[in-house]
């Protein structure tokens, strides 16, 4: 885990909660972190999560490098960029360069990466791999509903698309042996696909932005997550991980979740 | 299947025949669309069809629909849009489609109309066991094939399509038109625009271009994926279905809308019922009397 000035986040307008568990695995290959910074005189909050590739060696090291790079270099990148949307992109690209150095030492590996950057009441997101970014919004008192914001980089989905567009046959798409793999990750020479927002999204009072690894969402449904959002981020994160542990799912993957909320405000309607 | 299509022109003779045979609700929907068509500068090629005005044609069985279209300050209407047969919402779902023909290239109007018509026609061919995700890819494929099979050259169109089925949303997007979700008073853009600015930012992030040059490049807003392009198409879509809840509004719009109205104003106007909201948004934009106002098209689908 990497956190830089998490208390500072609370002193602005954000409330953070996070939780992790190794699950039934032998090694924790997830990593998560947060940091605050300043962009053109205004405070910003960065949240980042990475899920090291379990099937590849060195996954834990890749995720740690990716997250710690984000946390430690946030202010430098903020100072270099003149447009906020580019901050997450530059962090991801440079974190990838740093992680790829391990590859060059003949220690292959990779990690997913999801990140969110908040400024005032708006945020941007970036995603590589199959970790998830979801926005939970309160539509009635104590009732939250989910919305997945990012695209998962799954080779199978990309193959299906190519088949429909006539680039490959449907049989080739269906029978590709790597169909269940990711088609983009941090650690390659160049990141193949990046999903990111160019335009910011307004973060309403009561909203919860959730960053989570697949160890969470494969074991806990969207509606279970939604029910858990009716509490402060820290309590929600702890409850979710505890609930999953209680399920005693065989081969349970590493779990990591990071929840951001607006401090103190839990309104059922938007701020206008 | 009854297709609703507007590009500032009316329906063909075959279309009128089909309309007469259509359900009362479908005819009333046409009435509302041709009423919208009166807003454009050019005269519709066919006369609007009269129909009982009392029919609640703006929605049916759980979805309220609103739409607006205007030529703006341009000489041609190059946007096209359509909505599938609302009588089939409970079986195959509801499909809404918009195409924004490339204004800077010739035949933009024909491109968008061809794409939208083919998409709606294809939607009616859906097999019962077909997943919504596959339906949208098939619809996109047919739209693309229709353009390739036509005599159209040197043009293109954006393409956005939203399918609501069993209170779940799937969408597909090519180009820079937008699909948004309005949920509890806040607007969330769902799709990613295919614009050259993304590539410029990537070059800047890798140190191959200065950020200043990337941000100031005149081609930054140029579209990098569109139907009609000879190269490999880049498609944006959601893989996992988006669950919808009462009060959610799906908003499809061309850049003639979102480039001319601030998010705050748009969000405020979207609080109204879909048709009132669509008309209010159009009015708000046209009030500015911008001499460079692009064609504008918007569809609003509210989940009851």
Image (cartoon, grey):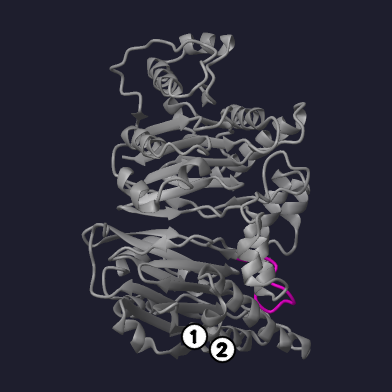
Residue located 42% across and 72% down the image: A118
User: Residue at horizontal 23%, vertical 67%?
Assistant: A266
Q: Residue at x 45, y 13 (%)?
A: B48
Q: Are marks 2 and 1 in contact (CB under 8 Å)?
A: yes
Placement of the C terminus of chain B among the 4 image quadrants: top left
> Residue beneath label 1, please?
A22
| Left or right of residue B169: residue A153 | right
Chain assignment, label 2: A
Q: Label 2: few (<14), some or many (≥20) within 10 Å?
A: few
In the picture provided, is A179 more to the left or to the right than B43? right
Magenta span contains residue B285: no
Q: What span is colored magenta in the figure?
A: A184-194
Residue A190 counted in the magenta span: yes
Q: Compared to B83, does A197 lie above or below?
A: below
Tell me where residue B90 sits by quadrant: top left
- Mark identifier at residue A27: 2
**Where is residue B26 drawn, in percent x and y?**
42, 19
């Amino acid at each position: 885990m990497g956190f830089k000035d998490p208390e500072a986040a609370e002193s602005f307008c954000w409330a953070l909660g996070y939780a992790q568990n190794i699950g039934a695995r032998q090694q924790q290959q997830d990593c998560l972190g947060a940091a605050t910074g300043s962009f053109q005189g205004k405070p910003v909050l960065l949240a980042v999560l990475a899920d090291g590739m379990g099937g590849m060696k060195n996954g834990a090291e890749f995720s740690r490098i990716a997250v710690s790079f984000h946390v430690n270099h946030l202010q430098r990148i903020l100072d270099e960029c003149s447009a906020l949307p580019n901050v997450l992109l530059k962090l991801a690209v440079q974190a990838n360069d740093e992680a790829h150095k391990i590859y060059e030492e003949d220690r292959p590996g990779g990690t997913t990466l999801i990140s969110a950057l908040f400024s005032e009441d708006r945020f941007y997101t970036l995603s590589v791999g199959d970790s998830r970014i979801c926005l939970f919004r309160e539509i009635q008192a104590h009732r939250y509903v989910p919305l997945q914001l990012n695209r998962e980089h799954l080779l199978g989905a990309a193959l299906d698309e190519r088949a429909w567009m006539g680039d490959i046959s449907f049989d080739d798409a269906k029978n590709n042996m790597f169909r269940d793999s990711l088609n983009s990750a941090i650690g390659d020479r160049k990141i193949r696909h990046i999903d990111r927002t160019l335009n910011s999204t307004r973060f309403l009072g009561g909203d919860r932005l959730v960053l989570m690894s697949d160890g969470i969402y494969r074991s806990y449904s969207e509606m279970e997550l939604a029910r858990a959002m009716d509490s402060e981020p820290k309590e929600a994160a702890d409850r979710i991980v505890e609930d999953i542990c209680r399920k005693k799912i065989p081969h349970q993957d590493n779990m990591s979740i990071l929840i951001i909320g607006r401090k103190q405000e839990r309104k059922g309607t938007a701020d206008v | 299947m009854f297709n609703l299509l507007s590009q500032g022109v009316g329906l063909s003779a075959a279309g009128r025949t089909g309309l007469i045979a259509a359900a009362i609700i479908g005819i009333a929907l046409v009435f509302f669309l041709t009423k919208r068509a009166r807003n454009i500068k050019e005269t519709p090629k066919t006369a609007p069809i009269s129909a009982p005005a009392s029919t609640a044609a703006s929605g049916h069985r759980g979805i309220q629909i609103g739409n607006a279209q205007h030529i703006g300050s341009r000489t041609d209407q190059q946007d096209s849009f359509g909505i599938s047969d609302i009588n089939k919402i409970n079986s195959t779902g509801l499909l809404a489609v918009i195409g924004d023909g490339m204004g800077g290239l010739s035949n933009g109007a024909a491109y968008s109309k061809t794409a939208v018509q083919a998409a709606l026609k294809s939607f009616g061919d859906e097999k019962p066991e077909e997943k919504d995700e596959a339906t949208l890819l098939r619809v996109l494929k047919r739209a693309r094939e229709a353009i390739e099979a036509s005599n159209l050259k040197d043009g293109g169109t954006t393409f956005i399509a939203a399918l609501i089925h069993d209170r779940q949303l799937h969408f597909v997007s090519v180009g820079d038109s937008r699909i948004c979700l309005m949920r509890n008073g806040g607007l969330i853009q769902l799709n990613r625009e295919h614009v050259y600015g993304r590539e410029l930012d990537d070059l800047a992030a890798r140190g191959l271009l200065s950020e200043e040059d990337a941000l100031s490049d005149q081609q930054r807003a140029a579209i990098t994926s569109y139907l009609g392009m000879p190269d490999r198409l880049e498609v944006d879509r959601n893989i996992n279905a988006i669950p919808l809840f009462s009060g959610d509004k799906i908003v499809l719009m061309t850049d003639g809308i979102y480039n001319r109205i601030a998010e705050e104003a748009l969000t405020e106007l979207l609080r109204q019922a879909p048709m009132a909201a669509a008309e209010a948004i159009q009015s708000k934009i046209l009030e500015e009397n911008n001499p460079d106002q692009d064609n504008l098209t918007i569809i609003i689908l509210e989940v009851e």
